[in-house]
Amino acid sequence: RPDRVAVLRVPSISASNQDAEAIHAAVHRALEARATKLVLDLRHTEGGTPFATASAAGAFLERVPLTLVNKAGVRWTYLFQNGDSSLERSDQPGKRETDQLATPALWKGPLVTLVSERTVSAGENLALLLQNAGRAKVVGAPTRGGAGVGANLFNLSSGARLLVATHLHLTPDGKRYPTRVSPDLEVAADLEALGKGQDVVLEAAVKLSGN
């Protein structure tokens, strides 16, 4: 954009780090273009694992801790920092899995996140990680309501797919994340204006002072 606002649209966050790598690469491009502000568009974002989502959040946060707990009380403790990630399980003491992104980036400038009623699952969790950390203001509409949980997908013989929540996400102070994202600034989509090339939600985010 001529106003040097970078807009990063994320359609999905895959179970692997592929999409997280793509988000970090996009942040590198924004930095190279000397963007002064970044708008993270999650209005159509879905899918993905909690850990890949935390890795994606690492493009905007220096340190991303994430804790998951299941019904049996088993805890998964994940940390993403400076491109490196680690995962530990409470039922496997002493075991630690590590991974690394190829080209991690870190956006430290103003950041605003866009969400809508179509934002679900990983899209909601990414928005919550940034909002809860005080890193990004959220603009748009309340999300669908699949946040704060980890889930397993089962393919049924009928061809249908069943998504079953198996884990809860916990904040760094041990509280449950909400099930949906509540925007800091609610802005309704205007389809008529969008048909004329004007995205009122995006423009509201551009005008808003980011964190």
Image (spheres, rainbow, N blue to C red):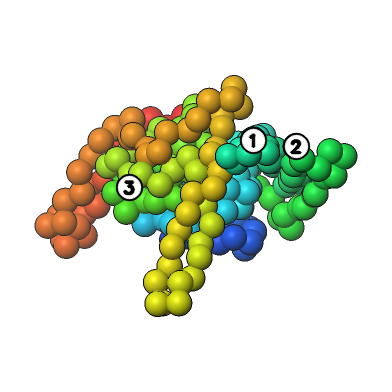
- The numbered mark, 2 or 1, whose residue comes first in the sequence reads 1
Q: Are marks 2 and 1 in contact (CB under 8 Å)?
A: yes
Residue type beneath disc 1: Gly
Give the Cα separation between the discs numbered 3 and 1: 27 Å
Residue found 16% across the figure and 62% down from its top: 195
Q: For this view, does 195 lie left or right of residue 108?
A: left
Q: For this view, does 204 lie left or right of residue 156?
A: left
- In this view, the mark in front (2 or 1): 1
Q: Look at the numbered disc 2 and give the secondary structure of its residue.
A: loop
Crowd around label 1: few <14 · some 14–19 · many ≥20 (10 Å) = few
Crowd around label 3: few <14 · some 14–19 · many ≥20 (10 Å) = some
- The numbered mark, 3 or 2, whose residue comes first in the sequence reads 2
Label ID, residue 109 = none
Residue wearing tag 3: 144
Residue wearing tag 2: 90
Q: Answer whether residue 68 is visible to the viewer in this image.
A: no
Residue found 42% across the figure and 33% down from its top: 178
Give the Cα separation between the discs numbered 3 and 2: 31 Å
Residue type beneath disc 3: Arg
Give the Cα separation between the discs numbered 2 and 1: 9 Å
Residue wearing tag 1: 73
Residue 191 in the image, given as x and y percentages of width and height: 16, 56
Which residue is nearer to you in this view: 174 or 99? 174
Q: Quadrant of residue 87?
A: top right
Which residue is nearer to you in this view: 101 or 78? 78
